[in-house]
Image (spheres, rainbow, N blue to C red):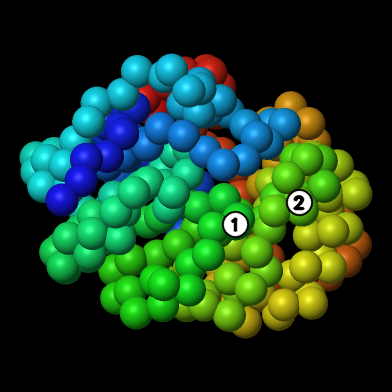
Amino acid sequence: MGKYKVVETFVSINGEATHAGELACFIRFAGCNLTCGYCDTKWANEPQVPYKSMSAEEIYAYIKSCGVKNVTLTGGEPLIQPEIEWLITLLSADKALRVEIETNGSVDIAGYDARPENVCMTLDYKLPDSGMEQFMRTENYAWLKPQDAVKFVVSSTRDLETAKKIIETYDLCAKATVYLSSAFSAITPAQIVEYMIQENMKDVRLQLQMHKYIWDPEKKGV
């Protein structure tokens, strides 16, 4: 099997999504196919970023050595890693693990429709202010499972209006857990809550990036 370009491995709390606040083992991969304006891991996407070449078995061994059940595969964009399917298969076979794949919404997830309940996708929808909305694959919503989440990172009222339209058009709250999250320093959580009240978005959840409130927003390895 192949090797994976890993730029970070660490244990911290999940700052987002369905297991926010719980300990997780993070595997961060190098490289992304998008360039979002608010990206907080641009360093991981640089062509010359230093990385460790790890096999699936080495990644699994590291995860087990950490002794936590939550695993977050992130990036960058993990689903563009060659042979990532093999790593996901290996990790999902261990039913003591709960595997979360953070993906940016531009990569086809149809091939992962047979994944078991201990593997979830946290799927982004890149809103207009990200500069990447044109790359979003709304076809992916046909493959969502109950354990999955869809995340909208919001920078403005325009973004909120677009998020509401997408949520309603694709009936996302009936398919997965849906989050609105503020782009750090771009819009306040209070503004998002006010919009949620105004539009009666009763099945949507506000999400804060907990790690950015606990540590310096630029700190790595958290």
Identify the residue position indicated by label 1 in the image.
Answer: 105
Q: Residue at x 50, y 28 (%)?
A: 45
> Which type of secondary structure does the marked residue at label 2 adopt?
helix
**How many residues crowd mark 1 within 10 Å: few (<14), some (14–19), many (20+)?**
many
Q: Residue at x 82, y 47 (%)?
A: 128
Is residue 205 visible from the viewing direction of this image? no
Q: Position of residue 203 (x, y in %)?
A: 68, 72
Specify whether 153 is left or right of 81: right
Is residue 157 visible from the viewing direction of this image? yes
Residue 168, located in which quarter of the rendered image?
bottom right
Task: Say above or below: 143 vs 77.
Answer: below
**How many residues crowd mark 2 within 10 Å: few (<14), some (14–19), many (20+)?**
some
Specify whether 167 is left or right of 34: right
Task: Say above or below: 80 vs 39.
Answer: below
Identify the residue position indicated by label 2 in the image.
Answer: 133
> Which type of secondary structure does the marked residue at label 1 adopt?
loop
Q: Residue at x 11, y 47 (%)?
A: 57
Q: Residue at x 34, y 27 (%)?
A: 7
Q: Nearer the viewer, residue 222 or 82?
A: 82
Q: Nearer the viewer, residue 25 or 89?
A: 89
Looking at marks 1 and 2 on the same chain, the residue that comes earlier in the sequence is marked by: 1
The amino acid type found where label 1 is placed reads Gly
Quadrant where the C terminus is found in the figure? top left
- Kindly indicate whether the residue at mark 2 contacts the one at mark 1 (C-beta within 8 angstroms): no
Task: Say above or below: 139 vs 46.
Answer: below
